Image (spheres, grey):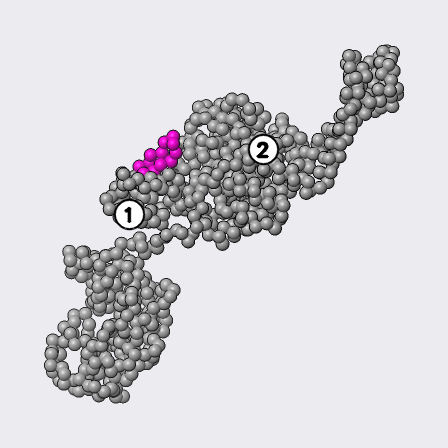
């Protein structure tokens, strides 16, 4: 059978198939709108509102889920998960909207699963009155549900900026949002201040976010102002703990909103196994009905404050919250700062109130219109009764009243429906006395509708009432960043005595003295040998000098611990050396005291203060570390002047004291001519006295430079196994 295929451009396929899906995810699923809700939240809460769950007793969650499926076709499990997050029991929201009974899990626990909907019960929290305020007065638009059997609101007419009050997170296609929560009282005050003056400094009212799980927010004014202004930025939240001196234990009672108890335990256990944390003897999750509690039993002599500094550094006990205030405005995603969010919310709320008042004006106008018709029959009640009585057919009653009193059809219908007992002067006068009151009310409402400032006054009153009724103290403490004592990565690294070995084939070994005492026999590649060894500690900085006049800096702990029986680290892989570049000398001195003695083939020697290699920034590489126009013969580090023997290529030797060599003022200085070279000779080697078995060397000493040196015929043996003449 022949298969028919159609060729289509990939761009057309994406445009026709993927783009509608992407827009659906952005607009209808992942990004909240200005009322602070995603469609799934809105559908659930509106269903509960229509079920009458603002008053009365709770109902089974399964009932709520079932009813919500009339608006949300995504399935009962998805609906219930949405519901769980909105409950008081889950502690996910700063201002929860659902009063729950039963197990709804916890925001701070990964493994504490919520119970099935048949076991739990729920109703709306009283604050939901503010979400549905006047929703039946045309404050917002309504649209058909997915099958056209009922209507649902496109937005909820919230009387406070809910978008800022509760945390909200979502991942759409190509974008995401992450809104932190702010304290309800602070948001209401800030909104009132903004309504009075759009140029207000909101940081005076909203200091920092506030999370339902509490914790301590590390406050940096510059960072926080940027978040408030742009809607983007990151700030840190850390756990709150108590120290139980009686039991020598740390009790963690609040954790960052972004993590869970299980994640913290897993990380601490991992650190204990790796040997990075040695102060903890046991860790237990003691969370109960009283709230979160994570207990760390400490070993004797442990300083709890120092331990917590390490834990804040190494575990999610201190975590970052990355803000991305991305909100749908009229169907378009937009990242906004708090002031811009308040502008959009104010615009939305003004529209809600204007529509509400217009609805009330229309209702009052309709009522007044009917009463004006009723007023006309005051002129002759008997006439009205006679018209109704003398009319033979019921359908002619309204037309005859219209002719008799010159009223319209609506008014005539109203008059015709009045009970016979009410066709008396007292009743009609009582009803028509409302006309002037209605006229006055309509005028007041009309004046408000036409004046944004008056509508803003209404919003202010609503915000004051919301703050008074539902406002609560902050849950998250604000800690000034400068008061936080932190530790660096280096503080967390264990310090111990080590030896570092440099080999000719460019291998470097870091071996602890304990390991070296156990096995000191080195494994080297064939033909390789040890050029140099230094004793230092694991936290010291190592300077590595190369034959290309580059000086590299690394911390000893950056090298991998090894054993003498291993080859060690291959230096070119660690330092990314240049082609044909080799390390010729290593040194450690974090105090940068003393001098470097460097000798060159041209017979010159230089004394460079080690402090010239100290940098304020942690640079990993210094170029032009020393003189480059002649090949380096040897580098020696000294704190005090010493005696050295210099050997020329034609076997002439001199013995000098390094006090004859001047200290230079820059690293690249050529130095002083130490030994005289002929056209065919050059400085071949430099030795320290302890590298010889010979003691009778004084006959080689010179006191002025440069010197020619003496030819020595006797065989001299080196006492230093790792160093020999450079024959290259």
Q: Is residue 570 above or below residue 279?
A: below
Magenta includes 568? no
Question: What range is drawn magenta here?
Answer: 284-297
The residue carrying mark 2 is 130
Q: Position of residue 282 (x, y in %)?
A: 27, 39
Q: Is residue 628 above or below residue 589?
A: below
Q: Position of residue 168 (x, y in %)?
A: 51, 40
Q: Nearer the viewer, residue 445 or 98?
A: 445
Q: Position of residue 641 (x, y in %)?
A: 22, 77
Q: Secondary structure at mark 2?
A: helix
Does residue 10 appear anywhere in the picture? no
The residue carrying mark 1 is 303
Question: Image point 84% across, 13% down: which residue?
Answer: 385
Question: Image point 11% across, 75% down: which residue?
Answer: 693
Question: Image point 45% across, 46% down: which residue?
Answer: 478
Per the rendering, the mark at residue 27 is: none
In the displayed structure image, the side of residue 271 where residue 419 appears, left or right:
right
Measure how far apart labels 1 and 2 are at the Cα level. Answer: 50 Å
Magenta includes 291? yes
Q: Nearer the viewer, mark 1 or mark 2?
A: 1
- How many numbered dots are placed on residues in this image? 2
Which image quadrant is residue 580 in?
bottom left
Q: Nearer the viewer, residue 463 or 661?
A: 463
């Amino acid at each position: 059978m022949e298969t028919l295929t159609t060729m289509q451009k990939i761009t057309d396929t994406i445009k026709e198939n993927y783009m509608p899906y992407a827009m659906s995810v952005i607009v209808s699923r992942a990004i909240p709108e200005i009322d602070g809700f995603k469609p799934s939240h809105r559908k659930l809460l509106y269903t509960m509102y229509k079920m009458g769950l603002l008053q009365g007793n709770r109902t089974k969650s399964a009932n709520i889920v079932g009813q919500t499926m009339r608006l949300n076709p995504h399935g009962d499990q998805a609906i219930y998960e949405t519901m769980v997050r909105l409950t008081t029991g889950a502690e996910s929201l700063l201002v929860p909207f659902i009063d729950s009974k039963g197990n709804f899990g916890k925001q701070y626990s990964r493994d504490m699963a919520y119970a099935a909907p048949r076991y739990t019960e729920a109703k709306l929290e009283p604050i939901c009155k503010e979400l549905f305020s006047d929703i039946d007065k045309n404050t917002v638009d309504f649209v058909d549900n997915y099958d056209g059997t009922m209507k649902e609101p496109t937005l909820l007419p919230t009387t406070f900026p809910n978008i800022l009050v509760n945390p909200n997170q979502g991942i759409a296609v190509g974008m995401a949002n992450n809104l932190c929560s702010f304290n309800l009282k602070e948001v209401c005050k800030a909104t009132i201040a903004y309504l009075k003056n759009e140029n207000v400094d909101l940081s005076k009212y909203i200091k920092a976010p506030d999370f339902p799980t509490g914790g301590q927010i590390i406050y940096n004014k510059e960072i926080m102002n940027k978040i408030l202004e742009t809607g983007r930025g990151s700030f840190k939240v850390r756990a709150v703990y108590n120290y139980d001196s009686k039991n020598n234990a740390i009790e963690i009672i609040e954790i960052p909103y972004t993590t869970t108890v299980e994640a913290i335990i897993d990380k601490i256990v991992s650190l204990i196994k790796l040997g990075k944390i040695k102060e903890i003897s046991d860790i237990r999750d003691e969370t109960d009905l009283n709230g979160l509690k994570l207990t760390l039993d400490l070993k004797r002599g442990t300083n709890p404050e120092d331990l917590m500094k390490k834990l804040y550094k190494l575990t999610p006990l201190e975590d970052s919250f990355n803000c991305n205030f991305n909100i749908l405005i009229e169907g378009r995603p937009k990242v906004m700062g708090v002031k811009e969010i308040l502008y959009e919310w104010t615009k939305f709320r003004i529209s809600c109130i204007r529509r509400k008042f217009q609805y009330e004006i229309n209702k009052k106008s309709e009522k007044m219109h009917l009463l004006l018709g009723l007023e006309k029959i005051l002129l002759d009640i008997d006439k009205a009764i006679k018209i109704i009585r003398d009319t033979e057919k019921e359908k002619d009653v309204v037309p005859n009243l219209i002719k008799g009193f010159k009223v319209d059809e609506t008014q005539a219908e109203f008059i015709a429906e009045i009970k016979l007992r009410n066709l008396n002067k007292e009743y009609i006068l009582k009803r028509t006395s409302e006309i002037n009151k209605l006229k006055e009310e309509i005028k007041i409402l009309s004046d408000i509708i036409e004046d944004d400032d008056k509508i803003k006054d209404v919003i202010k009153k609503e915000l004051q009432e919301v703050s008074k009724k539902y406002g609560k103290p902050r849950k998250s403490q604000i800690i000034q960043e400068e008061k936080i004592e932190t530790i660096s990565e280096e503080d967390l690294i264990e310090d111990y005595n080590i030896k570092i070995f440099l080999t000719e084939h460019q291998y470097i070994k870091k071996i602890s003295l304990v390991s070296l005492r156990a096995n000191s026999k080195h494994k080297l590649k064939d033909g390789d040998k040890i050029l140099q060894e230094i004793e230092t500690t694991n936290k010291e900085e190592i300077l590595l000098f190369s034959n290309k006049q580059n000086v590299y800096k690394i911390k000893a702990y950056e090298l991998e611990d090894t054993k003498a029986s291993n080859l060690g680290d291959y230096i070119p892989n660690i330092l990314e050396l240049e082609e044909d570049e080799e390390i010729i000398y290593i040194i450690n001195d974090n105090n940068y005291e003393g001098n470097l003695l460097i000798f060159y083939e041209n017979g010159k020697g230089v004394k460079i203060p080690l402090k010239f290699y100290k940098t304020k920034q942690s640079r990993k590489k210094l170029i032009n570390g020393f003189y480059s126009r002649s090949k380096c013969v040897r580098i020696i580090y000294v704190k005090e002047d010493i005696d050295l023997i210099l050997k020329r290529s034609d076997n002439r030797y001199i013995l000098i004291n390094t006090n004859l060599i001047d200290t230079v003022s820059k690293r690249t200085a050529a130095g002083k001519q130490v030994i005289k070279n002929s056209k065919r000779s050059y400085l071949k080697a430099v030795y320290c006295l302890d590298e010889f078995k010979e003691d009778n060397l004084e006959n080689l000493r010179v006191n002025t430079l440069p010197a020619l040196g003496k030819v020595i015929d006797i065989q001299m043996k080196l006492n230093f196994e790792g160093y020999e003449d450079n024959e290259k």
